Amino acid sequence: MAWDPDFIDFIDAYCDRWCERCPLTHKCAAFARQEDPDEMDDCAAAVEKAMESLREELAMPPARQRPSVEELLAPPEPSEREIQDYERASRARDERQRADPMMVRAREYSVEAHLWLRMYGGATREHAERARAAGGDALEAAVVKLEADAVLEALEVVTWDSVLISGKIYRAMDGKEWAEEDESVGDDPVQLDFNGSAKLALILAERSTAAWRLIARWGPEPEVAMRFAETLARLRHDVEVAFPNARQFRRPGFDDPPSP
């Protein structure tokens, strides 16, 4: 994919990484890099060459005679004591976040859903595929095929989302704690990274909740599948309480009005 000046900044920061199903990959620089890394490197080289020409036109000293941005902005080297204090605080933060009931529930869901899918995902998929292939009354067969297709889709969804949900909740929790300590965050209470992560967690939990309810009608141990749906419903409530502005966060590209 060629470099496109219409790439949307940060579009990949709040997506589910399911690129083959995404209608906006043509707006995503991360996807372009993934598809053709050499082409992106060529683009970067072309930009640098253009900047060098501009420096010459403006009689600016060449880059090698000027300090780099990194050198100008480089913070002083921390002392050994500062490093130890930072590491101690980071460990305490991580332990505190992992012990949070919302994070514990999200992590347990990820593990248990993965185990269910390993044990019963194949049998559920085979059941749905057999139903799709069965004959019988045309109308009834069509209805069964539609639901069987939905079950197969539901299995794909819960498999994809099972790890992402806990990961996005953890990122939201960690980001919120950092933001509360950072005076430079700004006054906008909505467009903050942790709200974007929390919103994505809500979206994933919602679609997986619906998927588990459908799977419960076709798979073994339906009560377990329903329990997963109930767990996700509780998680959604927890996330909305912890991140009350998450729903209002605008995910670049996904929540923008369509182009005319």
Image: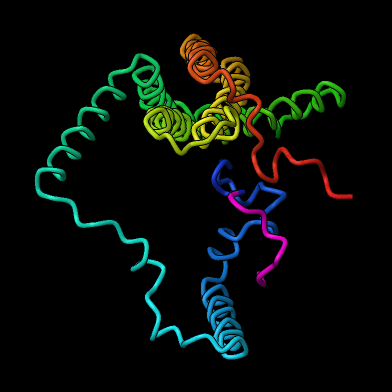
Please say if 207 is above or below 252. above
Note whether 83 is above or below 185 in the view shown.
Answer: below
Q: Answer with the quarter of the image where residue 183 lies.
A: top left
The colour scheme applied to this rendered structure is rainbow
Q: Residue furthest right?
A: 260
- Residue 31 falls left or right of residue 133: left
Q: Is residue 117 left or right of residue 157?
A: left
Residue range highlighted in magenta: 1-10
Of the pair 234 and 181, the residue shown nearer to us? 181
- Image position, residue 29 (x, y; %): 60, 61
Residue drawn at x 9%, y 48% as measured from the top left = 80
The stretch drawn in magenta includes residue 6: yes
Rendered residue at 70%/46% (across/down):
253
| Residue 241 in the image, given as x and y percentages of width and height | 51, 13
Quadrant the N terminus occupies? bottom right
**How many numbered discs?**
0
Q: Is 176 located above or below residue 222 in the figure?
A: below
Q: Nearer the viewer, residue 8 or 224?
A: 8
Of all residues shown, which one is farthest toward the left?
80
Is 177 positioned to the left or the right of 95 in the image? right
Say whether residue 72 is visible: yes
Residue at point 50%, 28% (across, down): 123
Residue 238 lies within the magenta run = no
Residue 121 is situated, as x and y percent measured from the top left of the image, at 48, 30
Residue at position x 50%, y 11% in the image: 234
Helix, strand or loop for the magenta stretch, by majority: loop
Residue 122 visible to an observer of this rendering: no
Q: Position of residue 65 (x, y in %)?
A: 39, 85
